[in-house]
Amino acid sequence: GVPHLMFRMANWRHNQVFDARLRAILLVAHETREGEVGRSVIELPLVRDTTALFTFTWTAMHRIDEGSPLHGPDAIDRLRAGGAQMFLTLTGIDDTIGQAIAARHVYELDDIVWNARFADVIAVQPDGTRVVDYRNFHRFIRME
């Protein structure tokens, strides 16, 4: 009953990343009382920001409630006026090479698809094996 902003990630290398952590922030311009322009970093708390083992896919979610900067009918207009951008950073340990890894992606506000959810990408085979169908990775289903 509460909308969520969802980010779907895939581990395309088919290795294992353990102790993976995701951070999501909004970077928004604002004007100070003195007329100077600055940038504010707004952390977007995630329902689950860590996973012990990132093997296939991971859908992280930010709850859009009264505490979210995305909440309210004018939220996107306010954020757009501030030139908001969303930054995601993923860190973890690559089990194959035993090294820390990091990835970053930037989203613009126009990248958000409202009133939709991601299509399923994991199929269970008759033998119980799970397979990721990457053809559906970017597909979404409208909730209207």
Image (cartoon, rainbow, N blue to C red):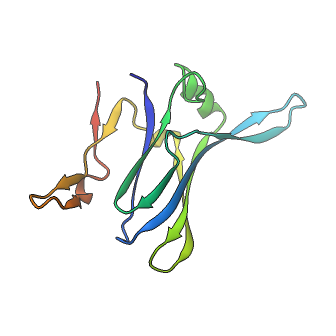
Question: 97 or 74, which is in the foreground?
Answer: 97
The location of residue 58, given as percent across then percent down, is 40, 52
Residue found farthest to the top = 73
Taking the image as shown, residue 55 lies to the left or right of residue 108, namely left
Residue under the image location 43 percent in, 24 percent down: 2
Residue under the image location 47 percent in, 58 percent down: 52
Q: Residue 144 appears in which quarter of the rendering?
A: top left
Q: Is residue 138 above or below residue 70?
A: below
Q: Is residue 143 above or below residue 54?
A: above
Q: Residue 30 appears in which quarter of the rendering?
A: top right
Residue under the image location 46 percent in, 74 percent down: 95
Q: Residue 102 appears in which quarter of the rendering?
A: bottom right
Residue found farthest to the left = 126
Q: In which quarter of the image is the N terminus?
A: top left
The location of residue 79, given as percent across then percent down, is 61, 32
Question: 35 or 40, which is in the foreground?
Answer: 40
Q: In this view, does 27 lie above or below 32?
A: below
Residue found farthest to the bottom = 97
Taking the image as shown, residue 126 lies to the left or right of residue 80, namely left
Residue under the image location 37 percent in, 63 percent down: 55
Q: Is residue 117 above or below residue 94?
A: above
Residue found farthest to the right = 34
The location of residue 45, given as percent across then percent down, is 58, 39
